[in-house]
Image (cartoon, helix red, strand yellow):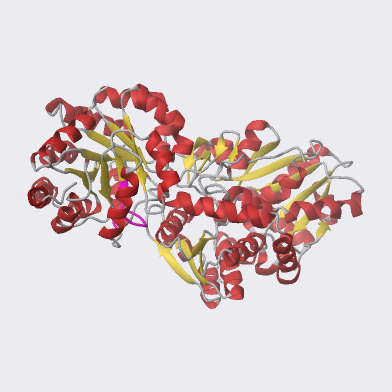
Amino acid sequence: MGYALPDEGGHFGRYGGRFVSETLMRPLLELQAAYERLRQDSAFQEEFSEDLRLYVGRPSPLYPARRLTERFGGARVYLKREDLNHTGAHKINNTVGQALLAKRMGKTRVIAETGAGQHGVATASVAARLGLDCVVYMGSEDIQRQAINVYRMKLLGAKVVPVTSGSRTLKDALNEAMRDWVTNIEDTFYIIGTVAGPHPYPAMVRDFQAVIGKEVRYQIMEFEGRLPDALVACVGGGSNAMGLFYPFLDDPAVALIGVEAAGKGLATGRHAAPLSAGRPGVLHGNRTYLMETDDGQIIETHSISAGLDYPGVGPEHAWLKDSGRARYVAVTDDEAIEAFHLLTRVEGIMPALESSHAIAYSGRLARELGRDACIVVNLSGRGDKDVHTIAAREGISL
Amino acid sequence: MTSRLADRFKALKTQGRTALIPFITAGDPEPRITVPLMHALVEAGADVIELGVPFSDPMADGPVIQKASERALAHHVSLTGVLAMVRDFRAQDPHTPVVLMGYLNPVEVMGYDRFAASAHEVGVDGAVTVDLPPEEGQELIAALRSHAIDPVFLLAPTSDSERIRRIVQSAGGFVYYVSLRGVTGAANFDLTEVVQKLRLIRAQTHLPVGVGFGINSAEMAAKVANVADAVIVGSALVGRIAALASQPQRIVAEAAAFIGQLRAAMDNATASATVSGVRR
């Protein structure tokens, strides 16, 4: 494989790296060493594959969405069904991997941050299965909005800690989880939920999620006998997109398109699209595109989808954007909701609002590419968790 | 080249005293208090002022300093605004070193060279960038040095000899030993561990070594004064400021009184230690 990033220090070009306080340097170096070792360890890799097969339910199907394709009137659209995974999203792939690593490193306690609660639930699930103590940090705003996931985590035995600092959302939950980690580094493993954070997290999470793209490479052959013309995935932190894109980085004929949340529209400033409308800076341990003020303060984001509501993005996406290997676009709340309804009605599949952003853009793309082309869209999660949000928008109380 | 920081530490050494370095967040609880507060801290016995630059995501700070950042940011205190405060302070006090402490992103947005040049121009002496390890910091360190600003670095209980060596190679002014695991303001201070670590650090550098994180009383400051070159007091002071946020007219006097107590306790401790010969 030609693509060989990140470098030793975790850099993707000028992005990534390890921007943390000195107290975290040793635990990060230890984590990196442990991960490097286990990455080459066939017993570890086999255990990971077995867990993905038997616990997560992989491989997830690649589904030819024929009625959606007809509706779009262009390229054939395939959906990678990460919504069918255990716990309902791609998040579980990564938590299974990191929890195995935690266990191998002798840690007895795992912590995580969560926005919508999907990563929290996925972490609480693997912690329950491996008998690890689990604490999940969640912004107090998000706790209000995601009561069901909070209760799911509690049922799974996790302690959910409300975060009341800053904007009380995902970014603040991440800050708080880092503070916990720095205080409890001896026994605690921090399971970051996306391809962000300090090295080695962006590369490690990508590697655990790469199973998505690896499966697509052989699954598409059954239908098309060739690689797809384009891959489409939503991007908040960007882990489902990196997992899909990574195994195709050395196939220049496969276009890679990440879809950010344009919220109420890029022009309004009320969005969560740092790649489309932000600029480079340093947050949460890495250099990447951010949404920030002219003074370098991080600003609050907006998206109807809690999972995309984050002011940064994984550093590898920043690199892929600058290098031109991937292209990033943005889709508004309204367009995502329209796509949610469309997929629900024509295919009988209710997508997560995050994934609905990718569906929305794939309509535009399918028409552009025309009927000879085929595209794969990552259906990163299922929409059950969003039913309340949809209902509330339509003035219905459940 | 001589610097205010080097001069100050040299003078203290001659006197057999330990530096007292209070930390306050610029603009907390309101911008107009900061400069008078800095002068009052000096008057009360501070040798160096550590001035926090507020940031929206202070990942390495505990709740006390997080809230200080939030109070300052409610007044839109920016890095540019903090530099202006130092300029005002410097107009009255040409001697007391000022060290800025904050996170990288505001500096990144301003630009390294522009930051270093402006900081020098207004009279800043050192800069601690909490989330910038030397591995990532060479470009900023070069910019700071070219404008005669000392790059001050943190060392942690988790820093082994190899990391200490690497960090002191990049450091200037003094090094700042974070005397406990965790965030600022936590409470698991262990003097014996500090003494052991200081020995390790001093084997690698001639720079003065300050100790901070978790020092919250005159008694504790006195103990640390006997083993370190500087005592850094952050959360304990900022917590007192927070308690008076609704009566800002009382902040300057009470903060000064607290620093005065620490000063007296430290000087007593170092004086008796010098007499009895335990001080190094």
Residue B70 visible from this viewpoint? no
Quadrant housing the N terminus of chain A? top right
Report the side of B263 relative to A12 (left or right). left
Quadrant housing the C terminus of chain A? bottom right
Above or below, comparing residue A35 to residue B249 in the picture: below
The picture quadrant where one finds residue B24 is top left
Name the residue located 46 percent from the left edge and 65 percent from the top edge: A144
Report the side of A217 relative to A159 (left or right). right
Residue B257 or residue B68, whichever sits in front: B257
Q: Which residues are magenta?
A: B177-185
Above or below, comparing residue A46 to residue B164 in the picture: below
Report the side of A210 relative to B265 (left or right). right
Q: Main structural element of the magenta stretch: helix, strand or loop?
A: loop
Above or below, comparing residue A290 to residue A98 in the picture: above
Residue A331 screen position, x and y as percent: 63, 44
Above or below, comparing residue B62 to residue B8 in the picture: below
Residue B54 screen position, x and y as percent: 32, 42
Residue A120 screen position, x and y as percent: 55, 65
The picture quadrant where one finds residue B173 is top left
The question of residue B184 being in magenta is answered with: yes
Residue B101 or residue B250, whichever sits in front: B101
The question of residue A129 being in magenta is answered with: no
Report the side of A384 relative to B176 (left or right). right
The picture quadrant where one finds residue A384 is bottom right
